Amino acid sequence: MTPSTLAPSTSDSSVQANAGILATIDGDAPSESRPRKSVFSSKLGFVLAAAGSAVGLGNVWRFPYFAATYGGGTFLFAYLLIALTFGIMLLIAEVAIGRATGHGPVAAFRQLDRRFTSVGVLAMLVPAIIFPFYSVIGGWVTRYAFVFLTGGAAAAAETGAFGAFTSQTWGPIGWLAVFILATAVLVARGINKGIERINLITMPIFIVMLLGLAIYTLTLPGGTEGLRHFLLPDFSELSANTFIAATRQSFFSLSLASGVMVAYGSYMKKSASIEKAAFQIGVFDTTASIIAGLLVIPAVVAIMGIDGLGQGAGLLFATLPHVFASMPGGAIVGAIFFVLMLGAAVTSSISMLEVVVNSLMDRAKWSRLKATVVTSVGGFLFGLPVTLGFGVWSNVRLGGRDILGMMNFLTDTVMMPLVGLGTVLVVGWVIGPQRIIAAVHQDGQLFRTEKMFVVLIKWVGPALLTGLVATSFLMAFGVITL
Ligand code: TRP
C-alpha cells in the first residue's frame, strides 16, 4: 500500500492505508479534507452500525404502507428484485467509495472526480431533509411507547385515536422534540460509543418479536386474506410505477444515495469484507421489511378489511393497537414492541444526523457538540411544518401533495435518484468499476459477485435511474401523474 498523501496527521495506520488506495485518482486532494480518525472497533462494528442505519421506520412503518399502496404481492416482487440485486450492488459501491477514500460524501466524491463534488453535496442534503420528517414519525413511536408503558393501551385502540393524536398541535411537537433530543444525545457522544452497543441487543429481539406477532396476526379472521394480498403478485398489475416505488423504497430502506453508507464505509476496517457486509445488511434489512409486511398487512385486512390498505402513512399506528388489544397480555407486548421500534428508529436517525454532523466537523471545523446542537435544532424547526401538516396545516398543498408527501417526493423521487445516478456514472463510467473492485478486493478479500456488480452499476443502474429521474421531472412539471 502506498502511503497516503492525504493523511497528514493521523496516528491510525489502517486509515492512512485506506486513504491511499484512491489517492492516485486525484492527486491534488484539497488540504482541508483529512481521513477519518475513528475506525469501528471490530469487523462486526460496521455491520451493526450500517444495519442499524438501514433497519428502522423504513422497514416497519414505511415498507408496509408502500406495499399496501402499490399492489401488495406485485410490489413485493419488484422490491425483492431491485433491493437484492441493484440495491446491494449500490451499497457495495458506496461503502467501497467511503473506505477507499477515507472520507465522507463531499470529499469522497470530489476525490473520485472534481466534477462530481456536487453529487456528494446533494447526498448530504438528503439526510438533512429526511431527518426532520423521520423524527416526526419517530415522535409518534415515542408517544406510543410511552402510552403503552403507562397503561394507555386500551385508549390507543379506540377508533380514531391515532388521527386525534396526530392532528393535535402541541402533543406531537413535544414528542418530536423528545425523539430529536434522544438522537442528539447519542450523536454528541460519538460514533463508536453510541451506536454499536444498542444495535447488538435490540435488533435481533425486535425481529423475533415481529415474527411472533406476524404469526399471531395470521390467526385473526381475515389474516390469511391479507397474507395472500401481500405475498401473491398479480403480474398484469406490474407497471413502471411499481418499479419506481420499489426503487424509492429500497434506497430509503438501505440508507442509500444519502452519504450515510459512504461515511460509514470510511470508518470501516480494511480487513473486513465489503461484499460480505453488504449482503448481510441487504438480506437482513429485506428480511425485516418482509416480516413487518407479514405483520402489518394481514393486521390491516383483519381489522379494517381490504379497503383499510388505502390509508397511507398512518397504516401501522392505526392498526397495531387493535392487534395488541385483541391478545392476552397485549398491553405489555405492545409496550415492548414500541420500545424496540423506537430503538430501531433511533439507530437510523443517528446515522442521518451523524453524516451531517461529521461533515460540519470536517469542513466548518465545528466541535461535535456545536454541530450536533445546530443540526438537531434545525431538524426540529423543519419538523414543525411536517407535524402541523397532520393538523392545522392539513389543507396545505405543495404541488398537489401534503407536506410530508412533498418532502418524500423531494428526497426519494428527485434527490436520491440523482445521487444514485451520479454514483453509478462516476463508478461505472468515469473512474471505472475496476477501481472500486480493487477496493473491495483489498487485503485479498473475495468479490464473488464482481460480474454482476459491473453489469448492474454500469448498465442497469444508469438505465433505471435515468428513467426514474426523467419520470420524476415529468411528474414535477405535471406532464404525467403516477
Ligand atoms: N434506512 C432507514 C430506515 O429504513 C432510514 C434512513 C437512515 C435513511 N438513514 C437514511 C433513509 C439516509 C434515507 C437516507 O428506517
Image: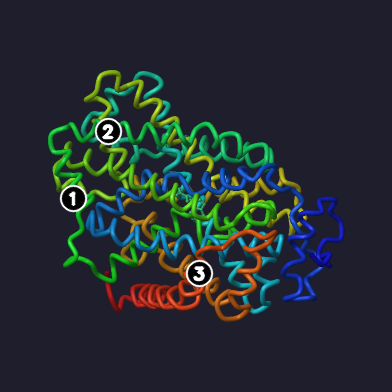
Which image quarter holds the N terminus?
Answer: bottom right
Is any atom of residue 236 visible in this view? yes
Q: Determine the image quadrant of residue 180.
A: top right
Q: Nearer the viewer, residue 199 or 283?
A: 283
Residue placed at 32% from the left, 66% from the top? 243
Q: The residue under label 2 is which amino acid type? A: Ala
Where does residue 350 sit, x and y in percent of width and height? 57, 44
Where does residue 310 sit, x and y in percent of width and height? 21, 51
Element at label 3:
helix
- Determine which residue is flagged by label 3: 453
Label 1 vs 2, first from the N-terminus = 2
Other residues around mark 3 within 10 Å, as few (<14) / some (14–19) / many (≥20) = many
Question: Residues under labels 1 and 3: Cα distance?
Answer: 33 Å
Report whether 457 appears left or right of 72. right
- Determine which residue is flagged by label 2: 161
Element at label 1:
helix
Where does residue 120 sit, x and y in percent of width and height? 61, 67
Q: The residue under label 1 is which amino acid type? A: His
Element at label 2:
helix
Label 2 vs 3, first from the N-terminus = 2
Residue placed at 28% from the left, 71% from the top? 240
For residue 146, above or below residue 420: above
Label 1 vs 3, first from the N-terminus = 1
Q: Nearer the viewer, residue 42 or 349?
A: 42
